[in-house]
Amino acid sequence: DVKVTQSSRYLVKRTGEKVFLECVQDMDHENMFWYRQDPGLGLRLIYFSYDVKMKEKGDIPEGYSVSREKKERFSLILESASTNQTSMYLCASSYTEAFFGQGTRLTVV
Amino acid sequence: AQSVTQLDSQVPVFEEAPVELRCNYSSSVSVYLFWYVQYPNQGLQLLLKYLSGSTLVKGINGFEAEFNKSQTSFHLRKPSVHISDTAEYFCAVTLSGGSYIPTFGRGTSLIVHP
């Protein structure tokens, strides 16, 4: 069974903290994505990666960075968490169709 | 760049009634089309996809969708819904030749009443 695994389902962090969200896929996909999901706004692309060490900004990259040191792992980094980054974060990998992790619900207080 | 419009943010329906969730897309080149479902506090899972071939696509859980190139639409249908179909549904598009970056609609909340 194909799988995308996100390291945490729920996280609570303080304003100003550095936050790491980890994602691992077992399908040998080259493409990996980080989306943010907010009510009424759907899924918005933060960053994507099409190969190891390769990354491209999506629609809302401000306040985020990413790391892809190995093909199976794609990390999202919030350099200094703020309350407006409270959201559901979804990782996906794809060839044609996307496979999603279970999501991480992040609350910044 | 491609875009996706889901025409209804919320669709209430009674159990065993038929339902249609509407999706229109915009793209100057050929696309692949997808419908995903999201249950509360879960990730998205694929319902069905159109890559090529027959324009009527059947998916899981009794759902189907029809690709209409002239109308640039990919509407999702089910002839008889169940309470368990209550979820958020997302339409998505990727370019058929390229980096396969999915662009999603804003979602339609399907609410099935007993």
Image (tube, coloured by chain):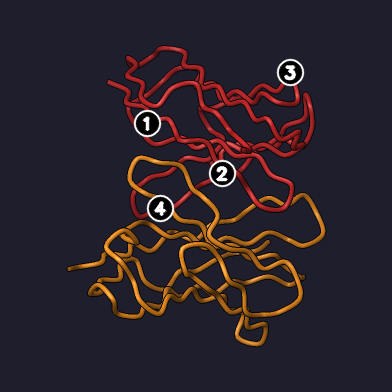
Chain colours: A red, B orange
Quarter holding residue B89? bottom left
The percent position of residue B88, horizontal first and vertical second, equals 38, 57
Image spot of residue B42 (x, y percent) = 40, 41
- Identify the residue position indicated by label 3 in the image: A69
Task: Tell me which numbered mark, 3 or 2, is placed earlier along the sequence.
Answer: 2
- Residue B37 is left or right of residue A34, and the answer is left
| Residue matched to label 1 | A105
Going by the numbered disc 4, the residue's amino acid type is Leu
Q: Chain of mark 1?
A: A
Position of B109 relative to A1 (above/below): below
> Residue drawn 37% across and 71% down?
B8
Instruction: Label 4, secondary structure: give it.
Output: loop
Kindly identify the amino acid type of the residue bearing the numbered disc 1.
Arg
The part of the image, by quadrant, that contains residue B10 is bottom left
Q: Do badges 3 and 2 share one subunit? A: yes
Q: Could you tell which of marks 3 and 4 lies nearer the N-terminus?
A: 4
Residue ranking furthest to the top: A17
Q: Residue at x 79, y 32 (%)?
A: A51
Q: CA distance from mark 3 to mark 2?
A: 20 Å
Q: Which residue is mark 2?
A: A45
**Disc 3 is attached to a residue of which chain?**
A
> How many angstroms separate mark 3 from mark 4 (CA)?
31 Å
Label 3 with label 2: CB-CB less than 8 Å: no
Give the number of callouts: 4
Q: Is disc 2 in the same subunit as disc 1?
A: yes
Seen at 68% across and 50% down, the residue is B101
Q: Which residue is mark 4?
A: A41
